Image (cartoon, rainbow, N blue to C red):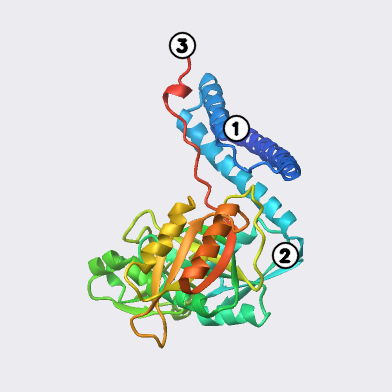
């Protein structure tokens, strides 16, 4: 009797879930119509005052029908983020009709299961066209694959919240003709992956990408006498463990990626920082145009003259034009001892007046200057509401 009641309830839940999916799909269709209106009337994608009012109303409505305010807030943060990203994607496609391809050939580090593979899947899920995955063994190979027109795009990790900047990618950007056309942030959850269940203390050899070892240094220190063997990618590490089928070897990578290679996770969240994220950039042979309604980021590189305060003077140009800098990275210039190339990320669109003014000034005062790309900001900050504004009268 109990099993029959449970089965009936599960059928009802399944029907309700299907209704929820249909309603969410209908909402997405409506937000696409909103995007069309914004394109027509040159309206900004985000209206955070409107988002705040929406959240307050929904939280109060949720309280009236017995829903937890935190649950409602979390749910609609996800829905609003999805709506914003879909609208930005539609606007970008309309502004760059020649960039929409029936097939997107994308180069990335490693094979199926690598973090770059997962980031590629995430980014191109919102883009039209069939995705063709092209795994590569090195960052240089990735760049070369796009430069030679074998691939249309490349997805490259640029920095991590735990291990910092990925210098090899910055060095590749210094010499490539490619342009940055997009970015995304992807959560990194390192797990200990094995072919068969085993106690952690019995593992003698670990395989992973060098960046992964750097991000999990505290965990490695706790393991003690374990041999670490660097691999070209996390997916390469998984392949080795799958082939060896030994209880004494393990890989470090994503749990989802491990499943693609027949591995299981026996421990997770291994990174030094529990909130571990990597930022990836997307590059292509040609730059894109970012509509002014879409929040944009611009990346540039420059080398300043060898005089005291030259870098400060260059950065002051940004401040004078009201442009926020989000990243400053320096890398040595090959063949020029003690000279550095500076990579700068700023919030702004190269089509905007203040940005154009700042770029003109920087070109005139630096030894070398180049815009690597202007692209949509993919990080959607959640709209906050005050607790007092959500309280309902009793």
Secondary structure beneath dot 3 equals loop
The label on residue 394 is: 3
Residue at point 46% right, 32% down?
A: 70
User: Which label lies toward us, 2 or 3?
Assistant: 2
Q: Nearer the viewer, residue 212 or 324?
A: 324
User: In x, y percent, where is residue 10?
Assistant: 60, 36
Task: Determine the residue positioned at 72% across, 38% down.
Answer: 30
Residue 208 seen? no
In the displayed structure, 39 sits above or below 128; it is above
- In x, y percent, where is residue 375? 59, 59
Q: Mark on residue 9? A: 1
> Pointers 1 and 3 in contact (CB under 8 A)?
no
Q: Position of residue 171 (x, y in %)?
A: 46, 77
Label 2 sits on residue: 99
Query: Residue 206 vs residue 49: left or right?
Result: left
Mark 2 falls on what kind of element? helix
Question: Quick one: label 2 or label 1, which is nearer the N terminus?
Answer: 1
Task: Answer left or right for 254 relative to 125.
Answer: left
Which secondary structure lies at badge 1? helix
Q: Which mark is residue 369?
A: none
Instruction: Classify 336 as above or below 67.
Output: below
Q: Position of residue 11 (x, y in %)?
A: 64, 36
């Amino acid at each position: 009797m109990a099993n029959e009641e449970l089965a009936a309830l599960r059928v009802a839940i399944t029907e309700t879930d299907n209704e929820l999916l249909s309603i969410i799909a209908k909402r997405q269709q409506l937000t696409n119509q909103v995007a069309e209106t914004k394109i027509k009337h040159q309206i900004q994608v985000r209206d955070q005052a409107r988002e705040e009012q929406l959240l307050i109303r929904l939280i109060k409505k949720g309280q009236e029908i017995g829903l937890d305010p935190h649950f409602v807030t979390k749910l609609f943060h996800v829905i609003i983020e999805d709506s914003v990203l879909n609208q930005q994607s539609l606007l970008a496609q309309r502004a760059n009709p020649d960039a929409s391809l029936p097939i997107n050939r994308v180069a990335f580090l490693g094979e199926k299961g690598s973090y770059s593979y997962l980031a590629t899947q995430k980014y191109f899920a919102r883009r039209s066209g069939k995705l063709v995955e092209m795994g590569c063994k090195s960052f240089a190979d990735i760049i070369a694959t796009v430069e030679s027109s074998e691939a249309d795009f490349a997805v490259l990790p640029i920095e991590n919240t735990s291990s910092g900047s990925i210098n090899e990618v910055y060095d590749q950007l210094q010499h490539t003709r490619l342009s940055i056309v997009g970015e995304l942030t992807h959560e990194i959850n390192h797990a200990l992956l094995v072919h068969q269940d085993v106690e952690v203390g019995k593992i003698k050899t670990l395989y992973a990408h060098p960046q992964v070892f750097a991000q999990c240094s505290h965990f490695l220190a706790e393991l003690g006498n374990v041999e670490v063997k660097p691999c070209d990618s996390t997916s390469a590490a998984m392949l080795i463990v799958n082939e060896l089928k030994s209880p004494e070897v393990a890989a470090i990578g994503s749990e989802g990626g491990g499943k693609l290679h027949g591995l299981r996770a026996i421990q997770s969240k291994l990174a030094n920082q529990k909130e571990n994220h990597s930022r990836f950039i997307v590059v292509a042979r040609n730059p894109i145009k970012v509509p002014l309604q879409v929040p944009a980021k611009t990346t540039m590189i420059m080398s300043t003259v060898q005089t005291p305060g030259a870098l400060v003077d260059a950065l002051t140009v940004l401040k004078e034009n009201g442009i926020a800098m989000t990243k400053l990275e320096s890398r040595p210039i090959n063949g020029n001892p003690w000279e550095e190339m500076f990579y700068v990320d700023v919030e702004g669109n190269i089509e905007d007046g203040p940005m154009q003014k700042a770029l003109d000034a920087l070109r005139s005062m630096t030894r070398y200057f180049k815009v690597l790309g202007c692209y949509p900001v993919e990080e959607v900050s959640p709209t906050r509401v005050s607790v007092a504004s959500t309280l309902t009268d009793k």
